[in-house]
Amino acid sequence: MIIVVDACALAGELLRKRGRRILGADAPTFVVAEHAAGEAQRRLHVRRAELKRRSGLTADAVDLLIDAALDLLGTCVQTVPGSVYASLQHVALRRIPADADDWPSVAVAMLLGGAIWTEDRDFFGCGCPVWRTETLLAELVALEAEASP
């Protein structure tokens, strides 16, 4: 199973224990469009500043958390270069008219026959399967239980 991760879901879940559990699973294969990977990285850097102001964590603890999230992004999620999915831009834009910025994730899902992991309702009805976080987590737990003797 191939799961294309939306930028918002990726940035948020890289900072959550459940998200790190999902992304650390042996299966499925997680991929992200190059555009969405860049957006997730930008969101993590913005969250660094917010966490330092609001979380009560030390600046060093926040830096460690963000750095670990960026490392996980680089090791557990495969980035698909824009040149690979650019030819699908026109069709992908047509499938996600409410938010044109999300077309790369739709294009990658179309290209690879994958599903999209997101909480963004704009993806619903794009013609690709869509997983919400809670459902994806429940599915992975069930698959792990089935695989265990």
Image: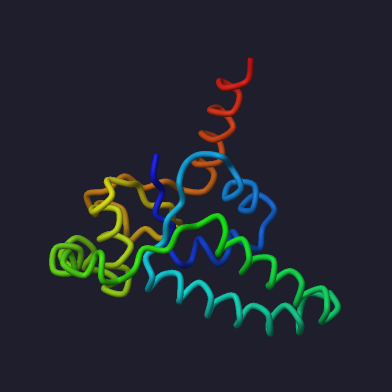
Q: Is residue 128 above or below residue 120?
A: above
Q: Is residue 77 above or below residue 81?
A: above
Q: Quadrant of residue 98?
A: bottom left
Q: Residue at x 26, y 71 (%)?
A: 83
Q: Residue at x 55, y 67 (%)?
A: 11
Name the residue nearer the viewer: 49 or 76. 76
Residue occupying the far top of the picture: 149
The N terminus sits in image quarter: top left
Q: Is residue 67 above or below residue 144?
A: below
Q: Is residue 23 above or below residue 93?
A: above
Apparent side of residue 40 relative to residue 104 in the rendered image (left or right): right
Q: Quadrant of residue 33?
A: bottom left
Q: Residue at x 67, y 58 (%)?
A: 16
Apparent side of residue 14 relative to residue 100 in the rendered image (left or right): right
Q: Residue at x 31, y 44 (%)?
A: 129
Residue 54 percent across, percent down from the top left: 76, 79
Residue 79 percent across, percent down from the top left: 42, 63
Name the residue nearer the viewer: 29 or 45. 29
The number of numbered badges drawn on the structure is 0
Name the residue nearer the viewer: 127 or 111. 111
Residue 74 percent across, percent down from the top left: 55, 64
Q: How is the image coloured?
A: rainbow
Q: Quadrant of residue 149?
A: top right
Residue 141 percent across, percent down from the top left: 59, 32
Apparent side of residue 43 relative to residue 6 in the rendered image (left or right): right
